[in-house]
Image: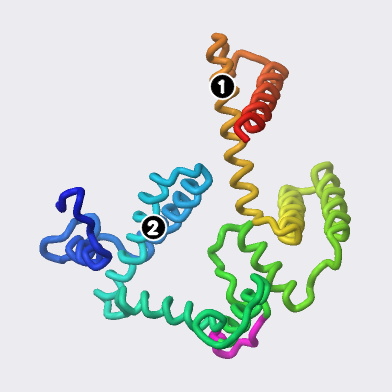
């Protein structure tokens, strides 16, 4: 273990991972892992980075970024052991991609706005994509199948919009949302569980499309809403506990009034804080 005033390097992190996976002297838990067992940790660490950013906690962010950094090192070590690729190949691949897709920085191309940069990126990405054998290329190619549903919906819609499959106005999307809500109401009254699920899915999809057209990341919007709900509900619990009340012993009306007080207190706090 190094003293606190001496920092480990990236190379040393790679060496640490190699020792953890050493067949003779490594860690029994690490030696049992494979790509599939580590993948859930990779996703979890990415979400924990996002959570630290949401909380604006830079100390946690530093730690969580370290945990996330370990994930490609871990996967690359397992790949190296199987003679697939090494961490150096991973670094080289992404570095080459960044240089190749930023000709306005590393070459002679010009980009005056973020929109210009996106156009260059999309053009370079399209040229570099490998077409599936025997399959016709689709405008939807490149969307990862395992993405969270909201994020995947937004990426699918963005891909379709780039080839013209797009509502011309926000009002068109709002009209479509009203139409889908009416269909959901009908399904709730007399539809099967499968029909209700289908209509709820349609409502979600239109809402994601609306968010995208407004320039809002739907995954981020829902995450912020989750955080808001948790913050207010915990405040509600604290208030009731302070008055000797239990959630299981009061009416919905009492809980709603306590909830509304939390909302009002937040308005005062954030106005004062600003």
Question: x and y percent of residue 208 in the render?
Answer: 71, 57
Judge by depth and name the residue closer to the eye, 204 or 170.
170
Q: Locate residue 10 relative to residue 108 in the image: left or right.
A: left
Boundaries of the magenta span: 128-138
In the image, is residue 180 above or below residue 252? Answer: below
> Is residue 249 within the magenta segment?
no
Q: Are marks 2 and 1 in contact (CB under 8 Å)?
A: no
Rendered position, 58 above or below 29: above
In this rendering, the count of numbered labels is 2
Residue 203 in the image, given as x and y percentages of width and height: 76, 53
N-terminal of the pair, mark 2 or mark 1, is 2
Q: Is residue 230 left or right of residue 98?
A: right
The residue sitting at 16% across, 60% down in the picture is: 26
Q: Which label sits on residue 68?
A: 2
The relative height of residue 72 versus residue 63 in the rendered view (above or below) is: below
Specify the label residue 213 is tagged with: none
Q: Quadrant of residue 81 in the image?
A: bottom left
Front residue of 35 and 92 = 92
Say whether residue 269 is visible. yes
- Mark 1 packing: few (<14 Cα in 10 Å), some, or many (20+)? some
Which residue is more in the foreground, 222 or 112? 112
Q: Secondary structure at mark 1?
A: helix
Foreground pick, 12 / 137: 12
Main secondary structure type of the part rendered in magenta:
loop
Instruction: Say whether residue 130 is magenta.
Output: yes
Residue at horizontal 56 percent and vertical 21 percent from the top = 237
Q: Is residue 210 left or right of residue 235?
A: right
Q: Which residue is mark 1?
A: 237
At 20% across and 48% down in the image, what residue appears?
Answer: 4
User: The C terminus appears in which quarter of the rendering?
Assistant: top right
- Quarter residue 270 falls in: top right
Q: Is residue 198 visible?
A: no
């Amino acid at each position: 273990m190094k003293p606190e005033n001496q920092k480990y390097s990236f190379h040393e992190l790679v060496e640490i991972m190699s020792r953890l996976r050493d067949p003779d002297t490594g860690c029994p838990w690490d030696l049992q892992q494979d790509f599939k067992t580590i993948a859930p940790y990779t996703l979890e660490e990415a979400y924990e980075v996002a959570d630290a950013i949401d909380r604006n906690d830079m100390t946690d962010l530093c730690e969580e970024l370290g945990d996330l950094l370990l994930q490609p090192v871990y996967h690359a070590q397992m790949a190296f052991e199987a003679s697939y690729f090494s961490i150096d190949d991973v670094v080289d691949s992404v570095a080459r991609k960044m240089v190749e897709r930023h000709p306005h920085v590393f070459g002679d191309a010009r980009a005056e706005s973020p929109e210009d940069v996106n156009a260059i990126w999309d053009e370079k990405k399209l040229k570099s994509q490998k077409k599936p054998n025997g399959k016709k290329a689709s405008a939807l190619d490149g969307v990862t199948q395992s993405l969270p549903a909201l994020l995947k919906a937004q990426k699918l819609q963005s891909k379709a919009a780039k080839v013209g499959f797009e509502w011309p106005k926000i009002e068109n999307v709002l009209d479509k949302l009203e139409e889908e809500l009416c269909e959901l109401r009908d399904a709730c009254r007399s539809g099967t569980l499968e029909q209700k699920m289908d209509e709820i899915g349609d409502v979600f999809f239109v809402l994601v499309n609306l968010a995208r057209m407004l320039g809002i990341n739907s995954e981020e919007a829902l995450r912020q809403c989750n955080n808001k709900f948790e913050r207010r509900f915990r405040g509600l619990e604290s208030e009731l506990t302070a008055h000797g009340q239990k959630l299981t012993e009061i009416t919905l009306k009492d809980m709603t009034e306590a909830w509304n007080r939390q909302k009002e207190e937040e308005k005062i706090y954030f106005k004062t804080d600003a």
